[in-house]
Amino acid sequence: QKAQIGLIGLGVMGANLALNIAEKGFRIAVYNRTSEKTDAFVAEAGELAENIIGCSSLEELANAIEKPRPIILMVQAGEAVDQQIEALKDIIDADDIIIDAGNANFRDTRRRMEALRDSGPRFIGMGVSGGEEGARHGPSIMVGGPREAYDHIKPVLQAIAARYKGEACEAWLGSDGAGHFVKTIHNGIEYADMQMIAEIYGIMRDGAGMAPAEIGKIFERWNKGRLNSYLIEITAKVLGVTDDKTGKPIVDIIVDRAGQKGTGRWSAIESQSLGIPATAIEAAVAARSLSAMKDLRIKAEERFKIETGSIETLDDARIAMLEDALLAGKVIAYAQGFAVMTAASEEFGWDLPLAEVARIWRAGCIIRSQFLDEIASAYEAETEKTDLLMTDAFSDLISRTQGALRKTVAESAVAGLPVPALASALGHFDQFRLGRGTANLIQAQRDFFGAHSFERFDAPGAHHGNWS
Ligand code: NDP
């Protein structure tokens, strides 16, 4: 009996996704460049092995699948994907479907799709989020590419995706790179969310002198409220874990250095290219970059010797303030991410369904939360695409919480506690909410040094100042 689907790349994600597919009753043919991995994978699959066909060549893989053949690529993003497409092209048919499920740059996805458009095979760019656990038991799946190719694989995606109150967290979001673009912005928002959580942790650790376990308890409490989310949940758990070797809280022995690459970085780059402010996301990417410059930071601490001030003891009211500050920062970061998607949707002609994006992020992915259900409802209630901050639900929420964000950022600044993402979010909101900004001065400067001209309030057209 032939397989209904194939998969190439039995790394962490591929192996788990293949088991998930086999478990849902689909027959799957698998292939990995290093064939020992394929053998070991089938041998360890237990009773699921009866739904798995291990293949030692691409030809064998192609022969094992029913036509039209859907083949998932779950290999390292970049060149490996191009190599696999090249190799498959000669073996499979024009109406077969290659599904790149790795973290591709959506521009590569567009290029690949364009290159295959006339000759085939059909190509789908599919963002998959949820890490190892998600791949195995239900990821969030963001699909871009030809609609009819998606329709062909939809039953499999419906079966393997995460579920939020019974609804599968998978959707076709638009043509060509739409799925990979949305995955990129998902990861950018993930960076911002994680950074803001880390900043609040920093305030509690360095400003209030709290121990990890104490901080963990607060996050645990917050996880029962408006901030309820996977990231808050795991933060609470992580802060409560002690290191086996030293008996110390594990976060205290982990080096404070994080990298930024791939999708996280691209989300900031694409926001800039589209001319959409995503400052909270950019600040989070930059904070990781600065975190990686550990040696320089140690020298700078020596040079500047600025004492970090302590902040008042965290009583219940102040803990509630930090909770609201985090909520406000989060609303602004998500609003920025959704604004970037809105602009990209126009630029690339995708017609991205924003409510649907929020819906498929409610479960399975790393930023999954109840909050996303509220975003989905907010977008459903709007007749026109608008900034999240302007929707009824979120303008109320930000109005209520912005004061807490303001106070938190102000106190942190005075105490010398770094809160770059929260401060960027606040800066964005304060500029966003004012009808009269300061770009009039920029325009005057530009006209002074480069005769760029400016608009006047009292007359149409382009004008110059009499600067001499
Ligand atoms: P792994 O490093 O675990 O596995 C990489 C896989 O790619 C292996 O099967 C490897 O084969 C294969 N591979 C690498 N280079 C080539 C090549 N030139 N030709 C053929 N096969 C190749 O990666 P992951 O499973 O973590 O990631 C896979 C994709 O999923 C990436 O795009 C990643 O960004 C994305 N992703 C990862 C997530 C995660 O949490 N890990 C979450 C969401 C997406 P071999 O065994 O022969 O080396």
Image (cartoon, grey):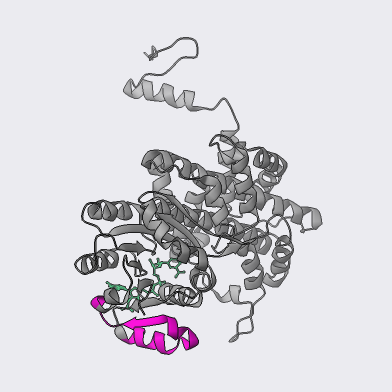
User: Residue 336: image x %, image y %?
Assistant: 52, 44
Q: Farthest front residue?
A: 1
Residue 394: quarter of image: top right
Residue 47 seen by the camera: yes
Query: Seen from this angle, which residue lies furthest left?
Result: 90
Whether 266 is among the magenta residues is: no
Screen quadrant of the C terminus: top left
Q: Quadrant of ligand 1?
A: bottom left
Q: Residue at x 32, y 78 (%)?
A: 32
Is 268 above or below relative to 21? above
Q: Is residue 16 left or right of 334 when viewed as pictured?
A: left
Q: Position of residue 57 (x, y in %)?
A: 25, 79
Q: Position of residue 167 (x, y in %)?
A: 59, 59
Residue at image position (43%, 42%) is: 345
Magenta highlight on residue 37: yes
**Observer-nearest of 119 and 265:** 119
Across and down, in percent, residue 379 comes to: 59, 42
Q: In this rendering, does residue 139 appear at all?
A: no
Which corner quadrant holds the N terminus? bottom left
Residue at horizontal 47 percent and vertical 50 percent from the top: 282
Q: Which image quadrant for residue 179? A: bottom left
- 127 or 203: nearer the eye? 127
Give above or below for 220 relative to 107.
below
| Secondary structure mostly taken by the magenta-highlighted segment of the chain | helix
Residue stretch in magenta = 36-59
* 209, above or below 355, in the image: below
